[in-house]
Image: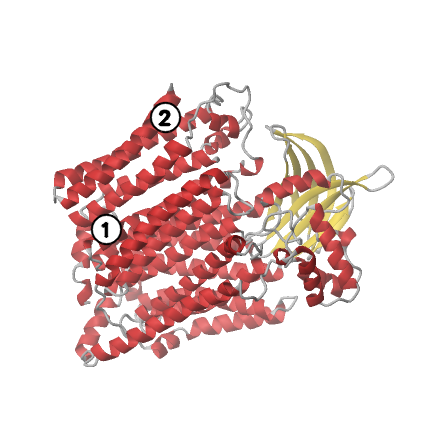
Amino acid sequence: MRALARLGAALAAWTLLCAAAADPAERLPDPGQEARARALFQDVRCLVCQSESIDESEAPLAHDLRQLIRQQVAQGRTDDQIHAFLVSRYGEFVLLSPRLSLGNALLWAGPLLVLAVGIAALVMRRRAAAETDAQGLTVQEEAALSQLTDDEPV
Amino acid sequence: MIDELGQFALVLALALSLAQLGLSVAGRLRRDAALAGAGEGAAVGAFAALAIGFVALIHAFVTSDFSVLNVAENSHTAKPLLYKVAGAWGSHEGSILLWCLMLTGYGAAMAASGRLPFGLKAWAVACQGALGSLFIGYMVFASNPLARLTAEPVQGNSLNPLLQDPALAAHPPFLYAGYVGFSVVFSLAVGALAEGRVDPAWARWTRPWALAAWSFLTVGITLGSFWAYYELGWGGWWAWDPVENASFMPWLLGTALLHSAAVTEKRGALASWTVLLGLGAFTLAMMGAFLVRSGVLTSVHAFAVDPRRGILLLVILGVAAGSGLALYAWRAPTLKDEAVFAPISREGALFVNNVLLAAATATVLIGTLLPLIRQAIDGTPISVGGPYFNLTFTTLTVPALLLVPVGALLAWKRADAMGALQRLWPAAAVAVAGGLLALALVSPRSAVAAAGLAVGIWVVAGALVEAGERVRVFRAPWAEVGRRLAGLPRGSWGMTLAHLGLGVFALGAAFETAWRAEAGAALQVGQTMRLAAFELRLDRVDPHVVGPNYEAVRTELRVLDGAGRLVCAAAPERRVYAAGGQTTSQVAICPGILDDIYVTAGDQRDAGDGKAAYLIKAYWNPWVRLIFLGPLLMALGGVISLSDRRLRFAVPGRARQAAAPAPAE
């Protein structure tokens, strides 16, 4: 719950020096590295908050995680290495975009399945339509039809 | 006394809902109009009884009657009157009462409206009674909003200060009016399945309810998003938070429903799919309520949560949705769907739109539920957050957006795609030009954002071209254009406006997401910081502002543009509420025509030598207003459509006559 996390963080923050990803005191000196770190933050969950990334959170843990990631970025580690490090330390829960795995396959397979079923249905309708609609409409019928449906709203 | 009266009214409403169910079913089975009429009367009675209960609850809140548990837990004497009233639906119990009130309200409206055919109406009223009995039963036995305390406290706990906000006072009523509006569609779908008949007339009776529900839901979601934007102080407007998703899923499916019901109404096609969407939209609405109210989700907005009742809500969801879907599985194969259409036709485009919207709903649904499922199955906690949704949802909806102007220009049954595209070339040209312009002029350069803008322009311009085509602009003499304009049915105005709103939203979302800027600094009085092309200067700090039920530290800033001219004065606050001891951040927004400068004040810091610095965060949110304006235009389009003579609730007799020849069109 962002709200409650914020309330809790706000109370804690009176004693804290820094409080947000954009906080000048936390930033890395190299703007390229800082931009990379900010991009990484958006994919990392603030574990004590609820559905909030560490980029947004004011919680102390988010602050620590940001510091950790900034350090690793400054040490020249790649994004993959940093991700792997975070997962080994906190579990998959820490990543906001789930990894490709069998357990998560439904995330991508589900919508694709809906698409596939829909397209299949359209193709089957077309077959059925081709069989029953062989005679088609006469020119006059077409004209009458477009006259009738012309101004119909959806 | 009034509380007891209200309590009695709630129990009475349960009895009347059960009577509504029993009488309507008996009336239908024995073909007895008097019995069915009594069922309709019971529906109106249940609504009246709940209205009394609701007034009693509001009375308890307004008079700060702390002998009522609900009031003691959620109100406070120092709270402004608006929030005392809104407090009536701020709690779990109160929000369930509001849900039931609306459910019976829609039921009463359906029972009292026009001349639906006897069998369909009896089944629909019965189904509405069954839903009412389930939810009112839950309220009476497990979630009593008027339960008394034996020892009355002197003061109440007050409402969460974040919820004390005008947009949020209005947010639940609109949202629930949307959610629950789909219950009528659900009931009419059940009725149609029971009667074994889904025809264009059924679609015509159903569509106004779906339109009303969809319009309310659109406004409700927009209000919620607007609230999150300016109240939570994070500068964003959508987080793919589970509770946001819970409200978004019925909206997506409801949008699909509106389009598929149009096909069923005009062409008699997709009948069983429309019925399934009708069942699905309310199922997702109930699931939304369950997810939000049960506490199974970890969310930003789950404010009134009680896990013990979650299981009961889950049972209700299972019973209601399960019976509906079982009835569908049993009866749907008997529904006839004889109308044929070519893939390239208005029906074809709307069908593809439905497939894409269904897939988008699936993405949101799976993304929201998979963490729960994985946790239950193998105990692995995973997170599905913004990055996943942004990728999958955008991938699925961009093709749908591209299709909108094309579909609106295609003819029914069999259409000429090249002809439609030819008529759309001005829209395409403007869109491409706009995208290229953005690529060339706006920094930092972003091809994705430019493409997003082009898509938004395409939808907006496409809607205008479509409206122009309808009135034959540039093709007919101006006198005829004027005549056609005057004669255009409201339904087509509504469609144009809704599509326009969609495009406006897409423009805002693409622009804001790509080009928002943020800055943060610890400022002492007199110091400045830069935000995009602006300069923010901390003028003054008032550490002891006293509000009605809070104390605040107010930081007063001046926002200057590049040339040093004053843009506005911003005074964000850090508030501490006396009642709960909570701290909140009051955002200051400098509204432009399209853009916002958004300033929040954070903690105080020691800057050395006895001086204090204040952590100020600021965002420049370009075109953010379009994000909220677009959906409002969409809802307005829905309302205008609703006022179309042919769709009005009160004239189903005429609507039936008009609908009868529809299959022959």
Q: Does any portion of residue B457 appear in the rendered image?
A: no
Mark drawn on residue B191: 1
Mark 2 belongs to which subunit?
B
Q: Chain of mark 1?
A: B
Q: Quadrant of residue B468?
A: bottom left
Q: Which residue is mark 2?
A: B7
Q: CA distance from mark 2 to mark 1?
A: 32 Å
Q: Is residue B4 left or right of residue B342?
A: right
Q: Residue at x 30, y 32 (%)?
A: B13
Q: Please state which amino acid type lies under the numbered disc 1.
A: Gly
| Left or right, residue B594 beside residue B116 | right
CB atoms of marks 2 and 1 within 8 Å: no
Q: Nearer the viewer, residue B116 or B325?
A: B325
B472 left or right of B658 in image? right
Q: Amino acid at mark 2?
A: Gln
Position of residue B412 relative to residue B157, above or below, is: below
Residue B97 seen in the current view: yes
The residue sitting at 80% across, 60% down in the picture is: A29
